[in-house]
Amino acid sequence: MQQFLLYFQIQNLERQIGRQRSIITDSETVLTQLDDQVATLIEYDRIRGPSGSIATRQAQAEERQTLNENIDAAYTRIETLQTELTPLQQEKLA
């Protein structure tokens, strides 16, 4: 029974770590999409004006900040989860 509980705890922590990694991947994908939007405007020499790359980048600022905060929080959560997971994995090996 103890081994089953240990296995369940390890699986749960690994699943949570996977979820946090998905958050990081998804947020990085959106940041790349935002960068691509700005790059497209620069490529077509649309830098200034209300629909230019500068205005677009400013309009994206809040979303970019939120995405970066999500990434930072996910890395912090992974670190915490990994700290919980390591002793359980060592116990399983023992």
Image: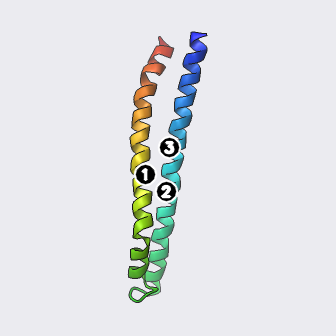
Report the residue at 39% width, 36% height from top.
79
Note whether 26 is above or below 4 in the view shown.
below
Tag 2: amino acid: Ser
Image check: 2 left or right of 28?
right
Q: Secondary structure at mark 3?
A: helix
Q: Earlier in the sequence, mark 1 or mark 3?
A: 3
Most foreground residue, 74 or 33: 74
Mark 3, residue position? 20
Q: Secondary structure at mark 2?
A: helix
- Which percent across, then down, holds residue 25? 51, 52
Residue 90: mark in rendering: none
Give neighbour class at mark 1: few <14, some 14-19, many 20+ (Cα, 10 Å): many
Image check: 4 left or right of 51?
right
- Which percent across, then down, holds residue 29? 51, 59
Q: Earlier in the sequence, mark 2 or mark 1?
A: 2
Report the residue at 44% width, 52% height from top.
70
Q: Earlier in the sequence, mark 2 or mark 3?
A: 3
Q: Secondary structure at mark 1?
A: helix
Residue 71: mark in rendering: 1
Is there a contact, CB below 8 Å, between mark 2 and mark 1? yes
Note whether 45 is above or below 91 in the view shown.
below
Report the residue at 39% width, 85% height from top.
47
Residue 27: mark in rendering: 2
Tag 3: amino acid: Gln
Most foreground residue, 39 or 84: 84
Is there a contact, CB below 8 Å, between mark 2 and mark 3? no
Most foreground residue, 47 or 43: 47
Tag 1: amino acid: Ile
Q: Quadrant of the N terminus?
A: top right
Kindly report the distance in space between the C-alpha atoms of the residues bearing marks 2 and 1: 7 Å
